[in-house]
Each structure stands twice: as structure tokens, then as C-alpha cells.
Image: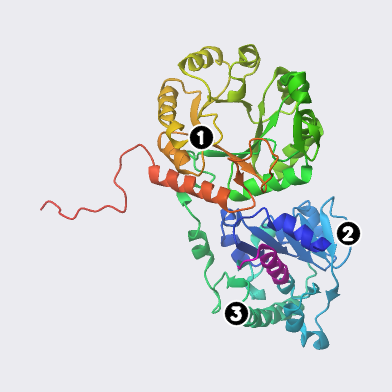
Amino acid sequence: MDNFSTLLNDIASIYSTDTIYIVGKGPSVDDVRPEVYQGSLVIGINDAERIVPADITVFHGEWVERGLAESQFRSRLYVASHEFDAKGKKVHVAPHVPLTQASSDLIMQRFMSDDLVIEDVLFLTALKIARKVAELKGRQQTVYMVGFDFNAGVGLSQKLGKDFAPQDAEETALRISVQEFYFVNTLYFLRDSLLNLKHVGGRSFSALTPSELNASLPHASTRPDSPNRVSIVAELTTNHFGDRTRLERMIRASKAAGADFIKLQKRDVAGFYTPEQLASPYVSPFGKTFADYRYQLELSKEDFLFVDQLCNEVGIGWFASVLDQVSFEFMQDLNPAMVKLPSTISEHTDYLKYVADTYDGAVVLSTGMTDAEYENFVLENFSKCSQLYLLQCNSAYPTPLHDCNVGVVRHYHDLSLKHDRIIPGYSSHDFGWKASALAVAAGARMLEKHVKLGNTEWAHFDAVAVDLTTPAFKEYVDNIRETEMIVGESEKRINESEHHKYRRG
């Protein structure tokens, strides 16, 4: 695999959907809701990343750099005709072929070839990148072209504010009209190909309008701004293996699938395990002992700062399971959204009391391997925390369905009616989504699901994790969002869909 294919694969592989958006700067882009793009690869033309956050940006004009600088270089990869300072982001240079009378005769021939060049008709280059993604994934991709109005008279997106492009009305009108001609040609050339191309707009060749694209969003009642939205946590555990590149891909893939948080782990290896445990044989790429394996998995302060910056950039929350006091003190300097105290340490009561006495932030507690006695201990001691998430959990990997005990979530929901700090939830160690959906129906407001990036034979507690390189985690999230919609609200009311067949006279 060449360097460009590797860069492209690293980005495309975090998206389990087979949908790609190519975004231009026409005003119709303003009519598309931002949630439409979530979970899909986005390719921006010129400085369209100022309107919609893009994964990949394609351009050749030097003026574009001023627009990109204003948006602080939001794309992960820039495909450009020249090297430039993208503030740490990847840049792939491809030759620019200006549109002349001679070159225009061969433009569609170049489009159908494997060679990547940057055309003046930039969406052709974007479509070649989309086709490469389809080849890497080995299946057809549906490509929506948004913000391509092909009408210079309607102007640009209102979200741009200042336009950095050289202003020449006649040249702009000519360039845009030519693009429409090539787009119609492209529809013909892509028939029966790996790309299912759909124009979004009001043209005769448009497949759907922006309103129709918005309406295709699943489960609109559980949009991110819904006050009753269930928080879905992608539990990364240590399946990043201490590799920042792998960690970044997992975070981006979790966000793309629709998760609200990612969760990591932190422990003081030397204090948490006995010398005998650390010296025991363990097969991994990192050495021959369990100590070699465990030390590799631990993230440093710099790693967590990287996580914090990345999560802020992509728009997902993060927190960590903190398994001992040394790690708890370490984590306080990082100010995570909340602190998790996992089932693993439910018998470490001295440490639990220390956290309860010194921490007033939100605490997440999984209750695997515990009973009513532990519940009473938690309620008595964790009175300072601002929120207390109680997550029903069974610590078997995987959990048999007959041991999921989702009814406990209903019990935690009842507790939340008496103690407004309590938020019920469910930590899933079972396969699939069914138990999690039932937990939502029982009142869960937080769900945890273990995830991984591909299959690794030697990874610890890996069997139950959902593979982020497949559609499985997005399907899990989608099923939970649909469950939320079905559960609805507790207030009984007459819905618009109802009507009386027999009315009183």
C-alpha cells in the first residue's frame, strides 16, 4: 500500500458507514443540518472546512491557505498542489492540471484513470479520492454532493463570512457553469461503479433536496440536543496498546459511530499487581512477562493531554477508570469529565472512601461482583459527588443473558427518584445490543460498551469488545437511539398520529 493509500485508509477506516459527503461552498449547504455528516467521511473543496468540519480537504489555489488558517486547519489530510504549513496536519502533494482547451479534452479520461491529479474542477479530484476509499473498503460508497449549486448568482454560504477567493464575477460565473457540465458527464461515467453519486439541491439532476437529506436522519427525537439522551460510552479499556495512532483512530471511530464519551483506564502497575503477577509469563509483542504487557498499556500524562485535545477537537467527552489512589491523584491534574470506579476495585474500600471524601465531581460506579451491602456502602459514603452514576454490571466476559439482571437498572431508577444525584445505567459485558436496549427501557441514562480496533489474539479481555473496524458499534448506537425513540416520555399525551375512529355525536 503506497503512502497516500495508507493515509487514506487510516482516515476512512474509522467510519463504518458507506457514506461520503463532498462539500462545496454554495448556499444550499446552509440548509443541511450538521448532524447529517456525523459518522461519515467528509471531503471539503477549497476552504469549505470553514462551513463543515472535513476529514480531507482538496485545493490548489494559494489563496485557500488564508481561509484554512482562519478555521485553524480542521481537516486531517490536505491534498494540495504544493507543500504548505498545515500546523501539524498531513499534506499529500499531487500535480495540478489547469483547465485549458487541450487539457479539457482529456479531463474525463484522467478522471477514470488511477493517477491522482488536482483538477481545476476540484470535485472530480474529490470523487477520485472517494473512489479510492471504495476500493480500500471493497464495497460501494454512496456519495452526497452538498453545496454545489452551480449558479454564481446565488452567492456563497452565509457561514463563510469573508471569502478569500479572488473576486472576478465573470470568471467565477464561467468556472461554475463549466463545473455543471462536468458534473452531468460524471453522473454518466459513474453508472454501475463503486460510487453511487447523489447531488443534493434543486437542479433537474438532483437526487434529493437538503430538506429530504435532513429527513433521512435516523431517530430525530434523540438528537444530541435532546435533554433525555442516553449517554453512550465507548469503553476503550487498554485496547489502544499504548499506541497514539491506534488511540486516535479508536477515538475518531467512536465519535463517528455516535458515542458521547470514550473511556480509558489508569492504574499504578507496580502497586496494583503483586511482583509474582508481574513476573508471570505473558505472550505479547511487548515482551515475555505480564509486566512487559501492562507497562506498555499505561498512558502517560502527555498521552492523556493528547486525548483531551483530540476529544475537544472532534467533539466527544472522555473519562477514565481510576483503579488506585496514585492514579486518582494523577488524574486530578487532568480534570476529566468524571471519574470511574470499576467493579474490579469494589472491595478496595479504603480507596473508595478516600475518593468519596475528597472528590466532589461526577463519579461513575459499576456494580459487578457486588450486592445490596455494597449499594448501602456507596449511598452512605458518596454524598459529596455532584452526580453518582450507578451502572448495573456483571463482571463475566461475556455475560450470559440470564445474568444480565437488567431489573437492577429499574431499581437504580427508583433510587434516582429519591436521590436526585443518582443516574442509573448499565455496563454491558454481554454480546449485542438487546440487554442494553432493555436497560434503556428500565431507565438507564448511561450505557458502556467495550470496543476494540480489529482482532488481537493476545489482548486481555478482548473477546466481548465490539470491533470498530466493522459497522457493529454504529449498529449498537443506532439500535439504542431507536430504543430511546420507542420508549419516549413518561407523560401520557395524545399524539398527532392518533385519531378517534368513532366520535361522539
Residue 149 position, x and y percent, is 62, 72
Viewer-closest of 435 and 286 = 286
First in sequence: mark 3 vs mark 1: 3
Magenta stretch bounds: 126-140
SS for tag 1?
loop
Residue 403 position, x and y percent, is 45, 31
First in sequence: mark 2 vs mark 3: 2
Which label belongs to residue 142?
Answer: none
- Residue visible at 83% across and 68% down in the picture: 61
Viewer-closest of 67 and 186 = 186
Residue 237 position, x and y percent, is 66, 35
Q: Rounded to the nearest whole Å, what is the CA distance between mark 2 and mark 1? A: 52 Å
Q: Is residue 103 visible?
A: yes
Q: Rounded to the nearest whole Å, what is the CA distance between mark 2 and mark 3? A: 36 Å
Q: Magenta stretch mostly in which secondary structure?
A: helix
Kind of residue indicated by mark 1? Thr
Residue at mark 1: 399
Badge 1 local density, few (<14 within 10 Å), some, or many (20+)?
some
Residue at mark 2: 84
Kind of residue indicated by mark 3? Arg
Q: Nearer the viewer, mark 3 or mark 1?
A: 1
Kind of residue indicated by mark 2? Phe
User: Which quarter of the figure is the N terminus placed in?
Assistant: bottom right
SS for tag 3?
loop
Q: Rounded to the nearest whole Å, what is the CA distance between mark 3 and mark 1? A: 47 Å
Q: Nearer the viewer, mark 2 or mark 3?
A: 3
Residue at mark 3: 191
Pointers 3 and 1 in contact (C-beta within 8 Å): no
Q: Quadrant of residue 449?
A: top right
- Residue visible at 52% across and 63% down in the picture: 213
Residue 315 position, x and y percent, is 65, 44
